[in-house]
Image: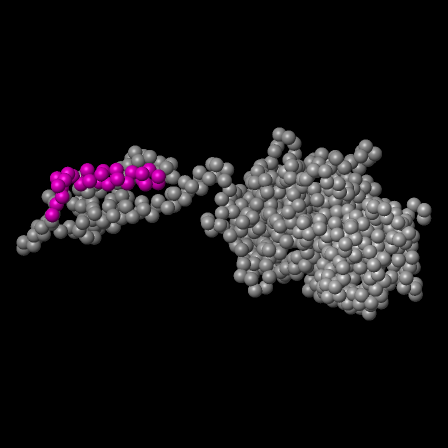
Amino acid sequence: MGKRRGGRELLRGLSKKQKKHLREFGEEHPFHDKVPGRPEATQVCELSDNSDKSSAESDSETEVEQVSVYHKLLATLKTSPESESEEEEEDESESEAEESETEMDSEGSQETREADGGGEDQNDVPEQEEATDTAEQQADGIDTSCDPSRGVIEEFTDVKHESEFSLETNFMEEESGDCNADKRDGSSSQAFSEDPFKQHMDKELEEKDVEKMSTLPKTSSQSQWPRLGQVTFSSTLEKPKTLKADKEVDVKQLYLHKPLESTWPKVNKQFLSSVNKPSDAFFTPLQRELFCIMNTYRDLFYPERNALTNGEEIRHAYCLHALNHVLKANSQVLSNNAKKRNQKPGTDNDDHRDQGLTRPKVLMIVPFRECALRIVHIFISLLEVNDKRKIDVSNKKRFKGEFGSDPEEKPPNLKRPEDYEAVFAGNIDDHFRIGVAILQKSMRLYAPFYSSDIIIASPLGMRTVIGAEGEKKRDFDFLSSIEILIIDQADIYLMQNWEHVLHLMKHMNLLPLDSHGVDFSRVRMLNLNNWCRYYRQTLLFSALQDPQVNSVFNKHCFNYMGQVAIRNVPLSGSISHVVVQLPHVFRRLEAESLTSVIDTRFQFFIDKVLPEYRDAIMSHTLIYVPSYFDYVRLRNYFKKEELNFTHICEYTKKAAVCRARRFFLKGEKQFLLFTERFHFYKRYTIKGIRNLIFYELPTYSHFYSEICNMMKATDNGVDATWTCTVLYSKYDAQKLAAVVGIERAAQMLQSKKNVHLFVTGESE
């Protein structure tokens, strides 16, 4: 066979028949080779036995050998070999050009092509196998988004459905199916400007305003509302405007997003009584006043949340507010997407600033998975207009499996107080976080945080993803543009770990370390100026007023709209619920400062209180200790002094708890150290108590009466020998008022006497 010519020069002089031969065999026919004037050196090649077969047969054999890989590739592309060959015949010129450029530069091009083809097939095999495995697992209902072997770091998220819920690639007409609805809403500029969402987010602060909020103290005013009671309004920028409670609510004045107007009455129907007026058929009195404050985008602190009575009412109210905010924000983005798509090139886009530096807008902090489950169910109910229009919820089955609970898991015959049953209902796991992306017709659970609108998490779930300084794997950029922060049941975090809440608040609304693909032409100026914290609304709900909870509201809430706090004082304390005849001795200790009160209390206890109970006559003494650190300090002191005692805390194993209770009941141990967190999580009845010492006033006021009433369970006890001693300081004013009532507490704090005696019981 003679030497062939260069590829491009050859193509110009070939006939159609020669091109076809070139495409099929990868070389020119020898007949057309030009023989040079001098003889060429003959090259001898050893041929195989079947060398007489044509190269076409050899090609077919190669295809037969690789048929399995080839068919796998074709199955992925959803094409057949016949259709592929037909397409090649129809496009001869393109095939000839590609083959001539790549295969005609050297001799033996046919073998080179076969080797290259085999290499391409081999490279495609792993991709095909992986795609096949993923398809099979999805068909079997297996979620691979949490599989670390597939390179997904975030174990809580779903990486599918990204484009369906992307705000950047969707438009108003695609989402709502009704462009005219958006036009109708925007037709009246006056009505649109009165929308609280629009007013709050479009307000442009100046640098002098930010400086005032950072330096000047707040001015406050008070008002009395029918249901909330004493309401305190505070603000820095201007004199706080006192709101008046609306006796009747017009839904149109609330500016709810379109689907919520029709779904909210149905969802909230369970809380409405027949006494409600027809004009007020949307809210309970408590919801009406709370939502009136929420809808003005002021910060709110409500310390009277009760899991038994108003807990679900409050949950529905703040879910309505959060969902209303998200739907309005997303509708604004989708509407501007359509406007931007239709506008002419080179037009100024400054009117389209409608986003933050990251997508998450609402952060909801709740203590248990059951709370997150109920919130998501409320969202679904609010988005479903009727039974026929069900919204599409992705990963719903997985969500129910991870956040639901099995009724059979609850041990039978456990008698616990009603408030305990209400707080610890359902799945009480406290380590979770989940992203939720919402569009009008669909909801995506387990969305990655940077593709989520709402993040629902526990303090521990946030703490593990935020990390600590120095850790390699930590992330808190998704908190940079949070516009509504909801902290529900804040009192429970005092029983979990309050440090997690403080750690979260320190990382709220910081400038992100990465851009995360944001379009800066769409970012609001308030986010670019790092002023998002001054626009963030914080809703804080608790069952009690505690200095640590108050500190978060006072030191970490900077909303330029101001703050609203409910400040009702307890008229009668929990001491009125003590049913046993018992003398209560309150002993005041003098501390110079709040930081020194811990050491002062310990010294006061070991010097003046404990010696009175060392006598063997004062057996069966239970010492109630709210703080775990105080408990450890007392336990170490008791061991050092070799006192006859036992101890129970939240970390004590079940066998040790049973042993300690038995020793205390029989009198084998004189003292029992007992932590508040153990009582919060277990609510065991401790039998055998004759003497009570409250090392510090309990966090929950009703725990005081519960512990005192345990004396009823004492067998053959003599009432006259029962005692109760309580230590307090002037820094325990709120706790003291919750136990003895505001009037008694004021007298005790103002009196010069350090000892006060009260007697409770049936004969009082």
**Magenta span includes 672:** no
Q: Is residue 381 left or right of residue 341?
A: right
Asked if residue 48 is among those painted magenta in the image, a careful observer would answer: yes
Tell which residue pokes out farthest to the top in this image: 388
Which image quadrant is residue 370 in?
Answer: top right
Instruction: Locate residue 750 relative to residue 14 in the image: left or right.
Output: right
List x then y, in percent, for residue 46.
Answer: 11, 48
Up/down of 730 relative to 228, above or below: below
Residue sitting at x 38%, y 43%:
128
Identify the image quadrant of residue 57.
top left
Q: Please say which color scheme the image uses.
A: one colour
Q: State the residue in front, 633 or 748.
A: 633
- Camera-side residue of 183 and 41: 41
- Residue 60 visible at all: yes
Q: Residue drawn at (35%, 45%), measured in percent from left and top?
A: 124
Report the front residue among 355 and 215.
215
**Residue 261 spot, x, y in % from top left:** 70, 38
Residue 26 in the image, given as x and y percentages of width and height: 20, 45
Whole-percent x, y for residue 296 in the image: 74, 50
Q: Residue at x 70, y 63 (%)?
A: 210
| Total count of labels | 0
Q: Which residues are magenta?
A: 46-73
Instruction: State the residue in front, 350 or 764.
Output: 764
